[in-house]
Amino acid sequence: MMNDRKIRTVIPVHPGKDVKPVLIRAIIKEAGLSREDFLKLLKER
């Protein structure tokens, strides 16, 4: 469930390298999102 918290999460991006799935999961968890909420937000971009 999405909430209205205002948080900032730093996502390390390095040219030529992919963000690992384990890091994506950690970011989603830190942001307090469900997988479904994250995917919904991703589609809105």
Image (cartoon, rainbow, N blue to C red):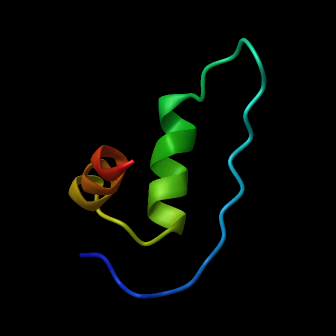
Looking at the image, how many numbered discs can be counted on the residues?
0
Quarter residue 23 falls in: top right
Residue shown at the point (73%, 33%) measured from the top left: 13
Residue shown at the point (66%, 63%) measured from the top left: 9
Q: Is residue 37 left or right of residue 26?
A: left
Residue shown at the point (53%, 52%) measured from the top left: 26
**Residue extending furthest toward the front:** 45
8 to 36, vertically: above or below: below
18 to 22, vertically: above or below: above
Locate residue 1, reporting x and y percent.
Answer: 24, 75
Q: Nearer the viewer, residue 22 or 6?
A: 6
Locate residue 12, reporting x and y percent.
Answer: 74, 41
Q: Nearer the viewer, residue 41 or 19?
A: 41
Q: Is residue 30 left or right of residue 28?
A: right
45 to 22, vertically: above or below: below
Residue shown at the point (61%, 20%) measured from the top left: 18
